Image (spheres, helix red, strand yellow):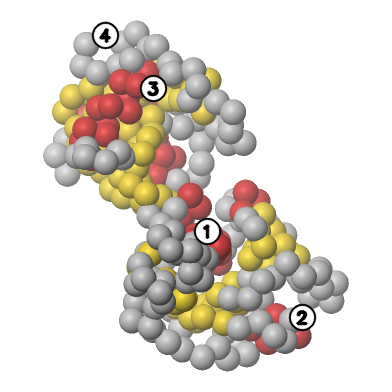
Amino acid sequence: MLQDIGPGRFVNHFSFQTAADEDFALVYQNDSVLASVIDGMLRIPKVREVRELIPTLSYRYCFTIDQDRYFFADADSEGIEKDSDKALSFVPSREYRNMGPMDAVFACCVGESLHRWHRNNQFCGRCGTLMEYSTAEQAIVCPQCGLTVYPKICPAVIVAVCDGDRLLLTKYRGRAFKRYALVAGFHEIGETIEDTVHREVLEETGLHVKNLRFYKSQPWVLTDTLLMGFYCELDGSDTVTIQEDELSVAEWFHRSELPDNHSGISLTGEMIERFRALGPEQCLSQL
């Protein structure tokens, strides 16, 4: 999955550090990262390379992968043009999410989530004052009224609805992602995460489910989301009534006929392949 960067180790403890020339620089423009791409492989530039393009950028430490340190460029990067010598340009996230190596892709995704958070919270939502970075934690703070805002993380569920050897697959309506997926949706205030599973399945497909079994979670930083994956059993009728403003397709597939056109770096893709390989009994057993 996206976060599977082993044997590399991701460390994101809050810390003040000074960027050195050989550290990696995460520079964003809207939903794109400054990088070069060679044969489908993403290369993040070093701080020294970015300093040659824009000497005035400032840097803030983000995280470490193994011994490699990654820094976020704080200043506005709108003026950076393509560097023909190093082939640096802004690569959209919809493209680099399908590239390699996984540690570089994961680093860019985490950095982009932090970029969106800061870009969308430059001014205090309570009093309108320009926000500042906290000196104690990964947060931004209003110097006027003290409001503290943390990075955006939205809990959501991924649900594999099983009916014997059949699995329910869906396709989203009106999105760029056209591959098969599982039922998914965001948690709402006041719900347990199990309530979210029942509600989302019912809303999107008209189906009732039982025997919920938590599988694992995934930090899907591409959309600032923490995904929680569940397998569950159909409870009652198998007639699907899709929520047409959310889904274009919702249909049953026997495990021997499951399509391959799903995301290879997502929790959804892993759960589909696990059902294909292990079948319903193991997927629905207590983990």
Nearer to us in this view, 86 or 131: 131
Whether label 1 touches label 3, CB < 8 Å:
no
Return the disc, 2 or 3, that comes first in the chain's sequence.
2
Whether label 3 touches label 4, CB < 8 Å:
no
Q: Residues within 10 Å of mark 1 (few under 14, many from 20)?
A: few
| Disc 4/disc 2 C-alpha distance (Å) | 61 Å
Going by the numbered disc 4, the residue's amino acid type is Ser
| Disc 3/disc 4 C-alpha distance (Å) | 15 Å
Going by the numbered disc 2, the residue's amino acid type is Leu
User: Could you say where residue 172 lies in the image, as x and y percent from the top left?
Assistant: 51, 28
| Disc 2/disc 1 C-alpha distance (Å) | 26 Å
Q: Residues within 10 Å of mark 3 (few under 14, many from 20)?
A: many
| Residue 151 visible in the current orientation | no
| Disc 1/disc 3 C-alpha distance (Å) | 30 Å
Going by the numbered disc 1, the residue's amino acid type is Asn
Residue drawn at the location 63% of the way across and 76% of the way down = 75
Nearer to us in this view, 136 or 91: 136
Return the disc, 4 or 2, that comes first in the chain's sequence.
2
Which residue carries the number 2 mark? 53
Q: Is residue 281 above or below residue 1?
A: above
Residue drawn at the location 16% of the way across and 28% of the way down = 211
Q: In this rendering, which labeled residue sits more in front, label 1 or label 4?
A: 1
Going by the numbered disc 3, the residue's amino acid type is Glu
Which residue carries the number 3 mark? 204
Which residue carries the number 1 mark? 120
Question: Which label was assigned to residue 237?
Answer: 4
